[in-house]
Image (tube, rainbow, N blue to C red):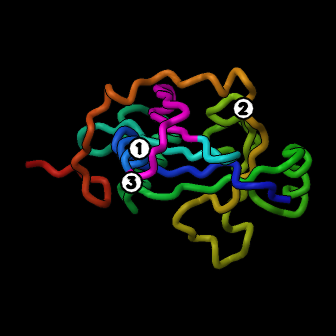
Amino acid sequence: MFLYAHHVTYVVYNIREMAEFLQKNFSMKPWKVDEFPQYGLRVLTYKVGQTLLEFMEPMLDDEGNPATEGLAVKMFADMLRETGPGLFHVAWAVDDIDALYKDLKGKGNDMDARGHDHPLHDSFHKWYKVFNVLPHSIGPSYANAVRGVFFQCAEGKPGPEDLVERGNFDLKTLPARSNRPPGGRIVRS
């Protein structure tokens, strides 16, 4: 059923800081860096074999609140405030995502659209589709899970035109460091 880890997504305060860490310690260079102002996000993406490694930075104001309206930026800002940076989800590559979605819904699993028109939706990247199985579908002991996506399924691979695309954002325009302690609040000196 699961073919491989399609993508692994982390939420971070500063994608430039993460890019510098990965370059210094693992000699990794980003595949893409994008800014999605309509969602209030900056996204740093690496290709690791078949798997995408993504770091999401919500655009925050000086108080650590979303700098723009939107479900994604609010969800990520809340995560940073409540638990600090960390793993958001792992998406599993599948074949025939439309049929799998119908099958899992038919078995009583709950999915939500999380700000999209439909639970089965296109990703930020135009070349793949995803859906999320909510934790309470696993059983009652998962109803209060800290993070609301335990299983995300994804289908789609970048085509040749996507592989040469490098994104729409320059990391060097971001500050190198953000002075944020765990929990997301900015330290004022």
- Tell which of 47 and 142 is nearer to you: 47
Q: Which mark is residue 80?
A: 3
Looking at the image, tell me whether mark 3 or mark 1 is earlier in sequence order. 1
Horizontal and vertical percent position of residue 38: 50, 26
Q: Crowding near pointer 2: few (<14 within 10 Å), some, many (20+)? A: some
Instruction: Give the residue at x 75% y 55%.
Output: 4
Give the magenta-colored segment's residue range.
25-46
Q: Residue 180 location in percent, x, y? A: 25, 51
Q: Which of label 2 and label 3 is nearer to you?
A: 2
| Residue 90 in sight from this viewpoint | yes
Q: Which residue is at 49% across, 45% downward?
A: 55
Which residue is identified by label 1?
A: 23
Give percent across and percent down for residue 58: 42, 40
Q: CA distance from mark 2 to mark 3?
A: 30 Å
Residue displayed at 36% across by 38% down: 16
Q: CA distance from mark 3 to mark 1?
A: 24 Å
How many residues crowd around disc 3 within 10 Å: few (fewer than 14), some, or many (20 or more)?
many
- Specify the amino acid type for callout 3: Leu
* Towards the viewer: 136 or 129: 129
User: Which residue type does callout 2 highlight?
Assistant: Pro
Disc nearer the start of the sequence (2/3): 3
- 94 vs 85, left or right, is right
SS type, badge 2: loop
Task: Give the mark, 1 or 2, whose residue is nearer the N terminus.
Answer: 1
40 within the magenta span:
yes
In this picture, residue 112 sits left or right of residue 28: right
Q: Which mark is residue 158?
A: 2
Q: Give the distance between the C-alpha atoms of the residues marked 1 and 2, in whole angstroms.
A: 23 Å
